[in-house]
Amino acid sequence: MARIGVFDSGAGGITVLHEAMRMLQAPEYLYYMDRAHVPYGTKTVEEITRYAKEAVSFLRGEGADLVVLACNTATSAAANTLRAAFDFPIVGMEPAVKPALALSPEGERERVLVLATPLTLKEKKLADLVARFDAAHRVDLLAMPRLVSFAEEGRFDTGEVRAYLEETLRETERERYRAVVPGCTHFLYFLPLLKELFPAETAWIDGTEGTVRRIAELLGLPAEGRALTGEVTYYDAGRKITEEKELERIAALHARLEEIGR
């Protein structure tokens, strides 16, 4: 049975884990969150690389056959370094710019908006990705750092979250965007509220399903199921989570994803 490690700074990677549990046939999961250092989006590249290397080393020691960097920020900052340091598959995540552009032919409402953390938006990895697929310069970028903290606090539909989104988007001409790309796994918890603030026909494209299909390809697993399967062991910075309160918090995140149709 495959043992899949999933790493994120906190709650965001649960979105990737949840999708893997829906699509893959009952592998075993090791989920590593680094809540002592969340959010990563405001850290330096050097700090994130150090945290990520510790996490991947731990997961490898626990028998992971593959590790998913279920964090766009960690992928931007550390994926290349980690792949050079370890001799097993490391799957990263990047904003789904290419498929979003494919939905947006040049013309009326042709633009694509990428929402992400400040570090993801300033890293060369994203700049290279956009340059590769956006010859017509149709991609715009917008930082939403506070969504990470809101997600970690389990605050998804509050008035404060709505006010933050409305203020952040206040000068954004939302009717111009054919597609919006949530470029941080934490942001997926807020899709219902985000969708309310854009035209109904706006497409929302993220890389979660593509990431899980890449896992399936590397491990030779079918990617066909839709019922949640698989055993999960959760860790917080290397400490196995056994406290009922913490496990209930994690269960609530999975319930949120079910509630919003993820």
Image: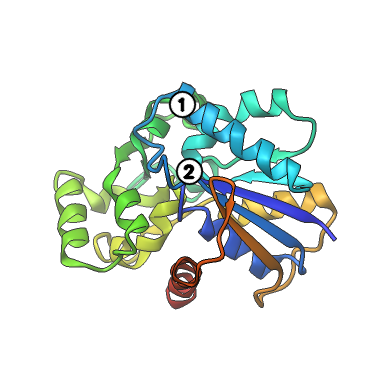
* Res 216 label: none
- Residue 237 seen in render: yes
- State the SS at label 2: helix
Residue 111: give x, y in percent of width and height: 36, 43
Left or right of residue 191, residue 23 in this image: right
Neighbour class for label 2 at 10 Å: few (<14), some, many (≥20)? many
Q: Amino acid at mark 1?
A: Glu
Residue 116, by quadrant, is top left
Residue 205: give x, y in percent of width and height: 48, 54
- Residue 127 seen in render: no
Residue 45: give x, y in percent of width and height: 46, 24
Q: CA distance from mark 2 to mark 1?
A: 32 Å
Residue at point 35%, 61% (across, down) = 190
- State the SS at label 1: helix
Left or right of residue 30, residue 206 in this image: left
Query: Is there a contact, CB below 8 Å, between mark 2 and mark 1?
Result: no
Residue 234, by quadrant, is bottom right
Task: Check disc 2 and report the residue beneath it.
Answer: 101
* Res 47 label: 1
Residue 166, by quadrant, is bottom left
